[in-house]
Image (cartoon, rainbow, N blue to C red):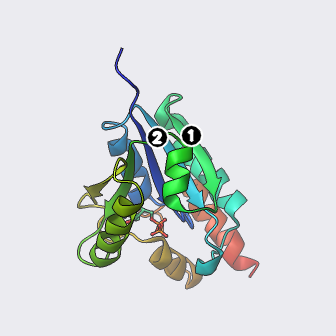
């Protein structure tokens, strides 16, 4: 039997959107197992704690993977996290122009750190192209409807959190 292909999909997931979920679904066509890395990322000043973000990711994705998806928190170098997970591939989503420059640079640096781990990009699908956690938070904070960007459970969590801020 050939070796299982393991991918890591890292992100902040503050909170998880339908764009992230779409990338996970499509990643499962490429890898046998997917480790979702929820970055502690204190620098980004997240709205939700890492435990909350990981729990939301877990809750959203549990029905998807049939045991093929695992959620882990990480605070170390992405390449070290990928190596610890035994990953062959780092998966990232790519939206229009805005993500390109940052991702281009990161991929180059990561390839220098470990050329055996490839970064694979999935283009955001057309109905998720414009969804970003940052904008979802801004819309929710101003009382807008975020139901086409996040699941009902996440929309509820956002409303509760923003009401208590
Ligand atoms: P990060 O802080 O690493 O950018 P995010 O949670 O914002 O974390 O995003 C994680 C990954 O998911 C990134 O590769 C990002 O480009 C991708 N992503 C985010 N939103 C979407 C979307 N709507 N469609 C496709 N990919 C997305």
Percent from the top left, x then y, of residue 35?
51, 44
Residue 105, compared with residue 151, is above or below; it is: below
Percent from the top left, x then y, of residue 40?
64, 65
Percent from the top left, x then y, of residue 73?
64, 54
Judge: label 1 CB < 8 Å from ligand 1: no
Q: Nearer the viewer, residue 86 or 115?
A: 115
Q: Nearer the viewer, residue 8 or 158?
A: 8
Residue 85, compared with residue 97, is above or below; it is: above
Residue at 70%, 69% in the rendered image? 160
**Mark identifier at residue 34:** 2
Residue at 57%, 51% in the rendered image? 57
**In the image, ligand 1 is in what quadrant?**
bottom left
Q: Is residue 71 left or right of residue 27?
A: right
Q: Is residue 144 visible?
A: no
Check disc 1: other Cα within 10 Å, few if <14, some if 14-19, many if 20+: some
**Mark identifier at residue 70:** 1
Q: Quadrant of the N terminus?
A: top left
Residue at 69%, 59% in the rendered image? 52
Q: CA distance from mark 1 to mark 2?
A: 6 Å
Q: Is residue 34 visible?
A: yes
Residue at 24%, 77% in the rendered image? 97
Q: Is residue 68 left or right of residue 118?
A: right
Residues at marks 1 and 2 touching, judged by CB atoms closer than 8 Å = yes
Q: Nearer the viewer, residue 58 or 114?
A: 114
Q: Quadrant of the C terminus?
A: bottom right
Answer with mark 1 or mark 2, whichever residue precedes in sequence: 2
Using the rendered view, name the quadrant where residue 26 is placed: top left
Check disc 2: other Cα within 10 Å, few if <14, some if 14-19, many if 20+: many
């Amino acid at each position: 039997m050939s070796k299982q292909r393991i991918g890591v999909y890292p992100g902040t997931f503050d909170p998880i959107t339908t764009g992230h979920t779409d990338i996970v679904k499509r990643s499962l066509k490429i890898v046998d197992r997917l480790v979702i890395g929820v970055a502690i990322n204190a620098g980004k000043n997240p709205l939700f704690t890492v435990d909350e973000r990981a729990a939301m990711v877990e809750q959203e994705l549990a029905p998807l993977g049939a045991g093929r998806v695992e959620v882990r928190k990480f605070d170390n170098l992405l390449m070290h996290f990928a190596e610890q997970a035994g990953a062959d591939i780092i998966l990232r989503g790519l939206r229009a122009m805005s993500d390109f420059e940052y991702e281009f640079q990161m991929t180059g640096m990561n390839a220098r750190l470990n050329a055996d781990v490839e970064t694979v990009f999935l283009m955001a699908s057309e109905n998720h192209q414009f969804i970003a956690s940052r904008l979802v938070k801004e819309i929710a904070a101003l009382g807008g409807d975020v139901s086409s960007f996040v699941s009902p459970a996440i929309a509820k969590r956002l409303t509760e959190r923003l009401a208590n801020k």
